[in-house]
Image (cartoon, rainbow, N blue to C red):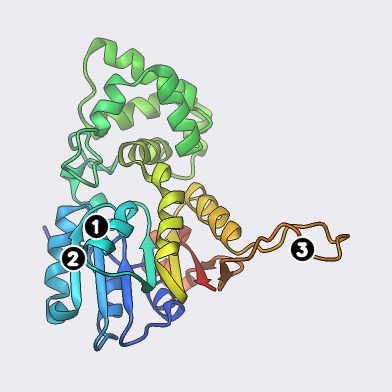
Amino acid sequence: MDFNHISVLKEETINYLNIRPDGVYVDGTLGGGGHAYEVARRLTSGTLVGIDRDDAAITAAGQRLSEFSERVKLVRDNFKNAKSVLSELGIDGIDGAMLDLGVSSHQLDEGERGFSYRMEAPLDMRMDRRQALSAHTVVNTYSEGDLSRIIADYGEERFARAIARRIVQARKEREITTTTELADLILSAFPAAARRNASGHPAKRTFQAIRIEVNGELEILKDAVYDLFSCLKPGGRLAIITFHSLEDRAVKQVFTDLSTGCTCSKKLPVCVCGRVAQGTLITRKPFVATAEEQEQNHRAHSAKLRVIMKN
């Protein structure tokens, strides 16, 4: 299957990165190479490092970026390791980096990956298929308390306890093995009125929560953002696209911390804390997709772009 993925906020991200032809850039979530292609075609003597933990993404992006092979380096890894990846490549500073977080269109559309509640598939949800932990493990072995916590925290699901209880009850009779089995169980845990009034499929938030747990998406995010920022040269920019409030909140917190200077009381005549802002917010409020892009690409509805520049 082709790696079909429509890049969200592509033009805006590239514009905010302010690409230099001789610069060094990192795409930490390479996907199908949509954003990366726009960076690579603007480079002359510069370098693009593309990172993704999904083997299918690396293969697809390699094909898409083949015309720029002399200035593109692709690495199968997690963006949380970007600092060490750059070190191994002998790169000691970058002019820009971007992250397009969450699950890709391809991963949702490729049924066998188990990301979607709409298609029957084995419970998987691993972005990196080399790892042991999968959705099957989470659903069939986590305690009711842990399931409830994950679904509430990562899915922001108000019926988390009922869903966790239903899963544990069901797996006592037999193992839960497919996405559709899990989606049906989640649906059965919803009160009838909530089912009728749901704006989307009742399983959406729980599937998101399990996916985040399997891939450690929030666990790594803040440290990874700090690390990527530390790799920037002065004037370098970091652009991050998020797709749900938990991701956006984490990115906002890190960007706010990095762009905060003196925290002394205004009553003091001089600064005594010594704190200096490390970065400057390029987007004080997140940039969102236009109505036209949202109409063309459903994934763009919840997308938010934040950008920071290193001082």
Compute the Cα span from label 3 to label 1.
Answer: 43 Å
Q: Viewer-nearest of labels 2 and 3?
A: 3
Q: Quadrant of residue 170?
A: top left
* Residue beneath the point at 56% across and 68% down: 279
- Crowding around mark 1 (Cα neighbors within 10 Å: few <14, some 14 to 19, many 20+) is many
Q: Residue at x 18, y 34 (%)?
A: 122
SS at badge 2: strand
Q: Cβ–Cβ below 8 Å for labels 2 and 3?
A: no
Q: Residue at x 15, y 54 (%)?
A: 55
Q: Residue at x 45, y 63 (%)?
A: 229
- As drawn, the residue found furthest toward the top would be 173
- Circle 1 is placed at which residue position? 52
Mark 2–mark 1 CB contact (< 8 Å): yes
Q: Quadrant of the C terminus?
A: bottom right
Three-letter code, disc 1: Asp
Return the mark for residue 271: 3
Residue 159 seen by the camera: yes
Q: Residues within 10 Å of mark 3 (few under 14, many from 20)?
A: few
Three-letter residue code for mark 2: Leu
| Rendering coords of residue 47 (x, y %) | 25, 78
Q: Toward which corner of the image does residue 58 lie, by quadrant?
A: bottom left
Q: Amino acid at mark 3?
A: Cys
How far from the left and from the top, in percent, is residue 97? 38, 69
Disc 2 residue crowd, few under 14, some 14–19, many 20+, Cα 10 Å? some
Q: Picture coordinates of residue 147 (x, y %)? A: 40, 25
Sequence-wise, the earlier of marks 2 and 3 is: 2
